[in-house]
Image (spheres, rainbow, N blue to C red):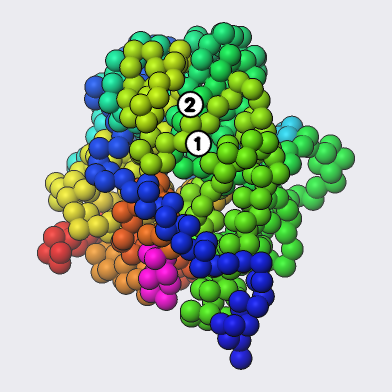
Amino acid sequence: MTTVDDIKAMFPEIDLDAIREKYAFERDRRERGDVSKLYHRATGEWERYGADPYIPVVEREPVRDHVEVLVVGGGVAGLSVGSRLRESGIESLRIVEEGGDFGGTWYWNRYPGLRVDIESHVYIPRLEEIGGFPTERYSRGYEVREFLHRLARHFDLYRDALLHTRTTKLEWQDGQWTVRTDRGDVFTATYVIVASGGLATPKLPNIPGIEDFKGSLFHSSRWDYAVTGGGEREPLTGLEGKKVGVIGTGATGVQIVPEVAKYAERVTVFQRTPSTVSFRGNRPTDETHVGSLEPGWQRRRMDNFLAMVSGADPGEDLVQDSWTENWKLLRRHNTGTYVSELTGELRELYEEYLDARVMNAIRARVDEIVEDPKTAELLKPWYRFACKRPTFTDLYLPAFNEPNVELVDTADCGGPSLVTENSVLVDGKEYEIDVLVVATGFTAGLTAVLAGALPVIGREGRSILEVWAQGPRTLHGYMTHEFPNFFQLGPVQSPNAVNFSHILQLHGEHVTKMIVAAKEAGAAYIEPTREMEDAWAAELLEVTAPEADVIVEFKAACTPGFYNGEGKYRARPSEYRPGPVVFQEMLADWRANRIGEVLHTAGEPLGEPTSAVV
Ligand code: NDP
């Protein structure tokens, strides 16, 4: 039988006690205090930082009509479900999108250096149907956006769409949804699908004085090319002779810094916590390989990647990049199933050693690349793998060898302490800045509905947030009692995975199948009972129970960030822990055998309000 000593003996190079101590030290020095004061959402008085810098808003007449299906949001989720609905024969379909064009995150994010950091061939939806092939393994942002637009054209999704339009209210009235928007539209819809994304609202750091800054300041997802010059494909000539500050070193910051460093006189990177930066190995697409692909290749590749990074063992690794490599080394994923033969504390210990091995390699890479030892030390991430969003780039670390790039550590003071008219202060030291880029992320996990930006009033006259006062109530994460013909696509009470594009596509397929089934059955409404919601909550608890404490412990031990509620994460996980592969199998079985339970004919009573049991 394997013992603790056997496991220790497998990792002679690792001093786990020292690593644990260092991780705790690095976490504690970043304790955040009142997390509600860390950021300003780009709404209300900060709304201008969320405005569209790319396409001017054009006046139009308000719409008054009826559509069969409304999709709120025209990003990866909305376009995926839209394409499936169109394919299934739904002609009356409207996507309402806040941006001036489709693309969602790929519309808003246009910062220099932007690339998809999941392999394009498994990330970009429906490549086989829409034709064309990404030119590189990890496409530039504009290429992803162009593919999404191609998807929209291919499935005729621009027809009836409302762009530069925010859905402001959904209300169930007289057996259908009344929809209101910020452009004065009032129309009705039989079905509503909210696909508004969980990382949509930019947030700015709440640094004293930031509103007094007189230079140029913008959020990474609203890149101001008027200031920096150039464009997504052109050099940033406007930065010549400029001192640029970058706040934020997450997946976005690590892509921006090397690009800006090519042009600016000086780049000062204000770092609070370093990211893990793994090998990228981007390369052009091999045309001969493309020609040899068998039909169905994309779904096979996507399924394989999903299985790889969800802890399943698909037998072979088709993508073979740093994502799958790291997960192979870890043999687990923080939202998937375990495949280790060990159980309980022995398994935890073994995984901790594996994790330390992966993280040691990531830290060693910093030493190999960054020449100045002091800077290298500051760039080393001291936490367990996937405590933060892993990043992959071969450009970020070498940028710190450039004479015009400077790293300023702000770990002990929680970020810069003050912004003046023309500078940023850290620990009393002043850094003169002309252009301040804030790559400080988005309000995480908050769809428009959850953020309260999109009130949804159900058939009992109550808002969904009232009904969810004690936590989300859904069947499978999509449907909620009291809200007929209403679906939400997102991470609530369903599985998560690094290729969220794939997850969203699966959501879209499932919801489309439900709507088609309802139409075929002649059902007027799709709605689960509250008992089904209770059963789903109980199932989530049950499938999560074996590892719930481990997950809570894992997240609590991480340095703070948006993955762990800025270090305050104590809740038991609410996602479907067995992972997306098991979830899909379960849903297919449910559709085959039980879908009829949520289909109702017109006039059939739909059940008591949820409050009766809360
Ligand atoms: P993140 O929330 O991941 O990172 C924000 C960064 O800002 C962190 O480094 C954070 O530090 C830092 N920060 C926040 N406030 C301050 C402050 N006051 N002072 C100094 N630093 C501060 O946002 P990103 O935009 O980087 O990434 C968001 C998500 O977008 C990713 O998780 C990923 O899902 C996605 N993404 C995907 C890409 C792709 O190619 N597919 C590319 C880029 C992003 P700290 O860690 O200490 O909180």
7 versus 223 height, above or below: below
Which percent across, then down, holds residue 561?
Answer: 40, 46
Residue at 35% from the left image edge and 71% from the top image edge: 541
Residue at 51% from the left image edge and 58% from the top image edge: 384
Which percent across, then down, holds residue 335?
Answer: 49, 61
- Residue at the far left: name it: 612
The reply, left or right, for residue 296 in relation to residue 206 is right
433 versus 374 height, above or below: above
Quarter that holds the C terminus: bottom left
Disc 1: residue Cβ within 8 A of ligand 1's nearest atom: yes
- Residue 392 placement: quadrant: top right
Amino acid type at circle 1 is Thr
The reply, left or right, for residue 505 in relation to residue 424 is right
Residue 514 in view: no
Name the mark on residue 246: 2
Separation (CA) of disc 2 from disc 1: 8 Å
Which residue matches tag 1? 249
Q: CB under 8 Å between callouts 2 and 1?
A: yes
Quick one: label 1, few (<14), some, or many (20+) residues within 10 Å?
A: many
Name the mark on residue 120: none
The reply, left or right, for residue 293 in relation to residue 416 is right
Amino acid type at circle 2 is Val
Residue nearest the observer in this picture, 450 or 195? 450
Residue 12 in view: yes
- Residue at the far right: name it: 288
Q: Tag 1, which secondary structure?
A: loop
Part of the protein shown in magenta? 545-553
